[in-house]
Amino acid sequence: MNGIKGIFYREMRVLKSRIYRNILASSVSPLLFLLAFGYGIGRNSSVGETGYIDFLIPGLVAMTSMNQSYGISSDINISRFYFKTFDEYLLAPVARWEIIAGEVIYGIIKGLIPVMIVLTYGYIAGMKHIPSLMLVPSLLIHLIIFSILGIMVALKVKNHGDQFAVNAFIITPMTFLSGTFFPVEKMPTVIKYIAHIFPLTYTTSLIRGSVIGTETDYLLNFGVSALIAGGFFWLCLHIVREMEP
């Protein structure tokens, strides 16, 4: 467990030096989406019996927390290419799963930063729902998935250009097609099938059900999310082992 503590401590020291930047980044983006979609388009709209702003807030929670937890890929990328920090992890007497676990815990902490910010925006905008206790496990599995995805991407890309390509072809489409801004059920059939490939679709459903109480199959969505998290962890462990010096 010392490996996990050491890696987590190192990453938190880095986060501490950038904390104001992270808070600002976590504040501006969801505010712009809330103004553009919530007030610009959906102010007097509803999704079923739910007001659009109430529908939007959990989607913004899912989107911004995903961006922050997945964003550890950029941190690892820089550390790997410029400071060779990841090479030092591999040379240290640390189990490979501990490296992943330390980075994932860091990703979870980083991903939690925008959650309270976006929920505060929601209450200022008039959201009256109180999140249920299911929000805790829903956020946890959500952040685990995207933290591991961030680690895998950071370790597989060859340069920063590849990183941007992954963001453009995977992360951006997933952000808009996974029910964060619009119900998946209202999309064309082909898009529905594509949406259900993305893990964000399942975790967004969990988070929305936990925040505003919309009907969702917790067992199915959590089960699929857990399988995705387990599969990602296995792939990530394989990638790390391939990098053995």
Image (cartoon, grey):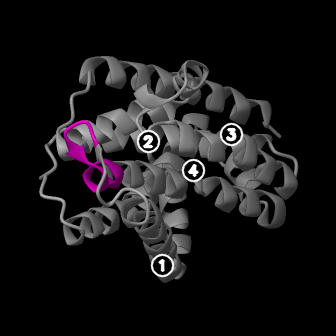
- Magenta range is 47-57
Q: Which residue occupies the foreground of this view, 121 or 134?
A: 121
Distance from label 3 to label 4 (Cα)?
A: 12 Å
- What secondary structure is marked by label 1? helix
What residue is rendered at 54% in x and 64% in y?
11
Q: Earlier in the sequence, mark 2 or mark 4?
A: 4
Q: Earlier in the sequence, mark 2 or mark 3?
A: 3
From this view, report whether residue 202 is shown above or below residue 47.
above
Q: How many marks?
A: 4
Q: Position of residue 76 (x, y in %)?
A: 68, 56
- Check disc 3 and report the residue beneath it: 170
- Looking at the picture, which amino acid does disc 1 mark? Leu
Locate residue 33 relative to residue 175 in the image: left or right: left
Classed neighbour count for the residue bearing mark 1: other residues with Cα under 10 Å, few (<14), some (14–19), many (≥20): few
- Looking at the picture, which amino acid does disc 2 mark? Phe
Q: Which mark is residue 24?
A: 1
> Image quadrant of residue 109?
bottom left
- Check disc 2 and report the residue beneath it: 182
Q: Nearer the viewer, mark 2 or mark 1?
A: 2
Q: Which mark is residue 174?
A: none
- Check disc 4 and report the residue beneath it: 70
Classed neighbour count for the residue bearing mark 3: other residues with Cα under 10 Å, few (<14), some (14–19), many (≥20): few
- Looking at the picture, which amino acid does disc 3 mark? Ile
Labelled pair 3, 4 in contact (Cβ < 8 Å): no
From this view, report whether residue 35 is shown above or below residue 152.
below
What residue is rendered at 70% in x and 49% in y?
167
Distance from label 1 to label 3 (Cα)?
A: 25 Å
Labelled pair 2, 4 in contact (Cβ < 8 Å): no
Q: Which residue occupies the foreground of this view, 109 or 66?
A: 66
Q: Earlier in the sequence, mark 1 or mark 4?
A: 1
- Looking at the picture, which amino acid does disc 4 mark? Tyr
